[in-house]
Amino acid sequence: MAPETMKAALCKEEGDNLSIGGAIIVEDVDVPKPGSREVLIKLAAASLCSTDLSVMDGMFGPKCLPVILGHEAVGVVAELGPESESYGLKVGQLVGAPPYTGMCLECHNCKKFGPDHCSAKKVKGINAPGYFSEYSLIDAASAVIVADDATRVDDVGRISPIFCAGVTVWDALERAQIEPGQSLAILGLGGLGQLCARYATALGAKVFALDIQDAQLNEVRNTVHEVINMKDLSPAEVDAKMKQVNNERGAEVAIVTAGSSMAYQMALSILEPLGRIVVVGLPKEPLSISAGQMSANCTK
């Protein structure tokens, strides 16, 4: 039985102090009650994502504040709403908690593109209470059953990033239409890029990892085909290095997970004609790329 109140970490106003008592305030709040298609979970682990930092930085504006942060987590089912059992959910299961909730499941976008494109959806940690709390609600339609017996799963902290970061790069790989043997350049080897590199390698792609920090590249050095440090290099120099390690060919696909405009310029420079570029990383500044270069190379 869930208690009446719980601890939760809220962002109440914009700020860059990530410490408890800075931009993040821990307070006692009421434990929510599950609605018809909702599930109450006791949180086992919740990850800090760059989107949480963006909320605190004010990217989404003050209208979303105050809000309980967090949008990727795993937890144990504590209570079920009336409709949630029809999704195969049971008390005691360990479930993954993705960001989206409140999808209608009936509109054109839901049926054709998926519930994450529903205009009625809300996003945990932005315009719906997130997962930095002892308990939280998840939408039964988006819950992912990890194990029927939560006690048999160790190191749940390694699982929680899958439900935002992992899903994000998997979606990017699907949009990129990666096939075994194709050359894929991943620009930005932070958490997203590292997951992307491992997924793409498992899919049989020939993966090239590009970043400006050796520490990031070292995380995937033994996983990918080749690493390239782009620090202090021009787009033309990065292109030359790419061809040097790829039989004088550019990359067939580039996925940009770095949040910088320069990473997108680098991606365009290393693609071969008819290459594909997939947008993941979100630069804070306006993105400026050459439409002429994209047109000349028939970049998709």
Image (spheres, rainbow, N blue to C red):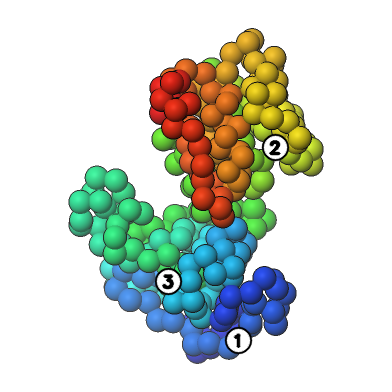
Q: Look at 64% across and 10% down and name the residue there.
A: 247
Gap in angstroms between the C-alphas marked 2 and 1: 39 Å
Q: Earlier in the sequence, mark 2 or mark 1?
A: 1
Tag 2: amino acid = Asp
Question: Where residue 294 sits: x, y (%)?
Answer: 45, 27
Q: Secondary structure at mark 2?
A: strand
Q: Is residue 51 above or below residue 65?
A: above
How many dots with numbers? 3
Residue in the foreground of this view, choosing between 196 and 2: 196
CB-based contact (under 8 Å), mark 2 and mark 3: no
Q: What's the amino acid at mark 3? A: Asn
Q: Is residue 73 visible?
A: no
> Mark 1 falls on what kind of element?
strand
Q: Which mark is residue 211?
A: 2
Residue type indicated by callout 1: Glu
For the residue carrying disc 3, how many other residues have a C-alpha within 10 Å: few (<14), some (14-19), or many (20+)? some
Q: Secondary structure at mark 3?
A: loop
Measuring 54% from the left and 23% from the top, which residue is drawn there?
A: 271
Quadrant for residue 235, please give it: top right
Quarter of the figure that contains the C terminus: top left
| Nearest to N terminus: mark 1 or mark 3 | 1
Q: Which residue is mark 3?
A: 127
The label shown at residue 27 is 1
Distance in Å between CA atoms under marks 2 and 3: 33 Å
Mark 2 or 3: the one toward you: 2
Query: Tag 3 or tag 2, which sits nearer the N-term?
Result: 3
Q: Which dot marks residue 200? A: none
Any part of residue 100 in sight: yes
Name the residue: 52% across, 18% down. 272
Residue 145: where, in percent of width, then height?
A: 45, 55
